[in-house]
Amino acid sequence: MNTYQNLLVSIEASIASITINREAKLNALNAQTIQELQEALTDALENTEVRGIILTGAGEKAFVAGADIKEFVGLTQEQAVELATRVQTELMDRIATSHKPIVAAINGFALGGGLELAMACQLRIAAEHAKVGLPETSLGIIPAYGGTQRLTHLVGQGRALEIILTGDMLNAARAYEIGLVNAVVPMEQLKTAAEALLRKIFRRSPFAIAAAIEAVNASLEASSGGYQAEIAAFGRCAAGPEFVEGVQAFLEKRPANF
């Protein structure tokens, strides 16, 4: 098993547990963490002993509090498009098309890229104190890792637009109410609830499980061009002046002057 700087990985009873271990940074997705996630997921998906995966964050504050915004600053439109395309295809799509079920155990804030990561998983269970959202418009950009598409598929156009355009956070109960998460449990039960869900799935045919995931994903293929539209729009935003103002305002803890 590989050794990672930003992940903790273990395998027990056919379940691979992958924990993003940057608690001091609220488990934010920087380039190294994304690379390590790609490697850990590939290993788990190729390991014949593994039948399902749990993805979570270290501690009780954050699942993933977002992408590392500093890595977006100064990108040209072309570089922003290249970055979003790479993360979308090499990580998010890899999760979404996994032939093994992946459960996001949302142990705290799942914001921006963190919610996009959770939405790429087949199933989501949230701790009662968790909060989720896509606040990118507050920074002058939009979700770039599939958020505009997967959120719409999960909760519908109207709710997706409200969440994205306002940038507001939702508590776990509201996320469950609108179908964004499958279950809400006390924090101390989060791991066991995710494991129990996978064990229930393990009683079914692995071949049929993989086929079902593929078939459900096929129902979304008609709108697959939306991911490219999202990436292109992100590129335009990331190279624009409002993103500069948005990041500066965020760092200075003041309202942005858009």
Image: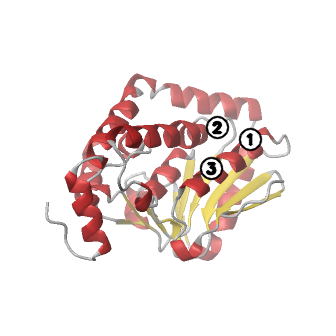
- Above or below, 227 against 162 in this view is above
Q: Report x, y in % for residue 233.
A: 29, 39
Badge 1, how many Cα within 10 Å: few under 14, some, many 20+?
Answer: many
| Mark 3 and mark 2: Cα distance apart in space | 17 Å
In this view, the residue in front, 239 or 150, is 239
Mark 3 sits on what residue?
35
The residue drawn where x is 74% and y is 41% is 45
Q: Earlier in the sequence, mark 1 or mark 2?
A: 1
Classify residue 6 as left or right of residue 93. right
Q: Residue at x 46, y 65 (%)?
A: 65
- Upstream in sequence: badge 3 or badge 2: 3
Which residue of the protein is positioned furthest toward the top in this rendering? Answer: 222
| Up/down of 218 relative to 252, above or below | above
Q: Position of residue 147 (x, y in %)?
A: 40, 46
N-term-proximal mark, 1 vs 3:
3
Q: Residue at x 44, y 56 (%)?
A: 71
Q: Is residue 96 left or right of residue 202?
A: left
Q: Amino acid at mark 3?
A: Gln
Which of labels 3 and 2 is toward the front? Answer: 3
What secondary structure is found at the residue carrying circle 3? helix
How far across and how far down the image is residue 114, in percent?
Answer: 48, 58
Q: Amino acid at mark 2?
A: Ser
Q: Is residue 145 above or below residue 206?
A: below
Q: The C terminus appears in which quarter of the rendering?
A: bottom left
* 189 vs 243, nearest the viewer: 243
Query: In the rendering, which numbered label is found on residue 98?
Result: 2
Residue 39, image x and y in percent? Answer: 70, 47
| Residue most extreme to the left | 258
Image marks 3 and 2: residues in contact by CB distance under 8 Å: no
Which residue lies under the disc numbered 1?
45
Residue 13 as seen in the image, left or right of residue 101: right
Q: Is residue 131 visible?
A: yes
